[in-house]
Image (cartoon, helix red, strand yellow):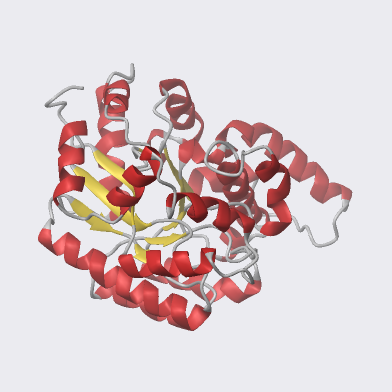
Amino acid sequence: MIKNPGYLRIATEEAFLTKEVFAGFQRRVNDAAFDDPGFRSLWGFYGASPSPRAQFILGRLLDLGAQRIADMDAAGIDHQVLALTAPGVQVFAPAEASALAIDANDQLAEACRRHPARYSGMAAVAPHDPANAVKEMERAVRKLGFNAVVINSHIMGHFLDEPQFLPVLEAAEALDVPIYLHPQGPPPAMIRPYLDAGLDGAVLGFGAETGLHMLRIIVAGVFDRFPKLQFIIGHTGEALPFWLYRMDYMHGNTVRSKRYPFMKELRHPVSHYMKRNVFVTNSGVAWPPAIQFCQQVLGVERVLYAMDYPYQYAPEEVGVCDAMAIPDADKRAFFEGNARRVFKLQV
């Protein structure tokens, strides 16, 4: 790791958890009537397992103070953009979800005030309570100083291209804040083949579900309706950049064939929206070939650095990214410049 590389290392998909949301997760895990195998798999493990990995991650999620900053210093991370960990408040009934989101945002804002050089925040909202989600987005942006919103992918099996979520998308565009579409476990209708093989988490299930979600948003025409709306997805784009050629070809042919009456022609190919309305981070993928491919096909200005702390805390991976054989200007954009612009950072 280079000690003074000539740029700030700004990590843009870093997770935290409040005690109140964690207590809600525990109640949900113990509620036999709550039918979400993906959630139960995720938080049944991280919330109760005595394994060193589970204990490390839970402890770090709950810490917004000295331990987190020590870990950042050890890895050479100058600044974290923090978001409430998956599945956020989206597994709770609407009123409870909105109340927990407000409290989490207040706690995160206080941490950002204590450590303004080290932390910035994304607003948590309850998209299944649209009116209150819009109010909380407005409060978080205008009063708390947040410049992004995190939505932890599906909302109890529903997706953001569905009509009930249009007010949330409209508000994000109007407020000029991106939505970070962060993974969680696949919904019940999707999860079984992943869960049966132990592949429901970050190894495959998270990316498969979130890539599907992002593609649904695109092909539903959301960006034709909200052309200035911006999304961010992690893990080098949940594989979508690597499929752009085939998605353009097959989506165009599917529309022309009229195979699905509900699938309408878009103003542009799928790849256009990925290059104009979607940013990607490399969270959890400290692999130069994948990062450089995303820069090549989406544009250097569309790819941001992230670590995925604390789920993937590997300080040596920072040095791997520092050593990428790309122009210095591109490296500064990756680590610092793009994050400053996308999240309107003043650090």
Residue 8 left/right relative to 85: left
Residue 4 position, x and y percent, is: 11, 27
Furthest residue in direction front, as rendered: 50
Q: How many marks?
A: 0
In this view of the protein, can residue 145 be seen by the observer?
A: no
Residue 276 position, x and y percent, is: 49, 48
Q: Nearer the viewer, residue 242 or 150?
A: 150
Residue 132 left/right relative to 39: left
Residue 213 left/right relative to 178: right
Residue 63 position, x and y percent, is: 24, 54
Residue 199 position, x and y percent, is: 62, 39
| Residue at x-position 51% and y-position 54% | 44
- Tell me which corner region of the image, top left, top right, bottom left or bottom right, holds residue 253: top right
- Tell me which corner region of the image, top left, top right, bottom left or bottom right, holds residue 50: top left
Residue 114 left/right relative to 57: left
Q: Nearer the viewer, residue 198 or 297?
A: 198
| Residue at x-position 27% and y-position 35% | 335
In this view of the protein, can residue 50 be seen by the observer?
A: yes
| Residue at x-position 32% and y-position 30% | 314
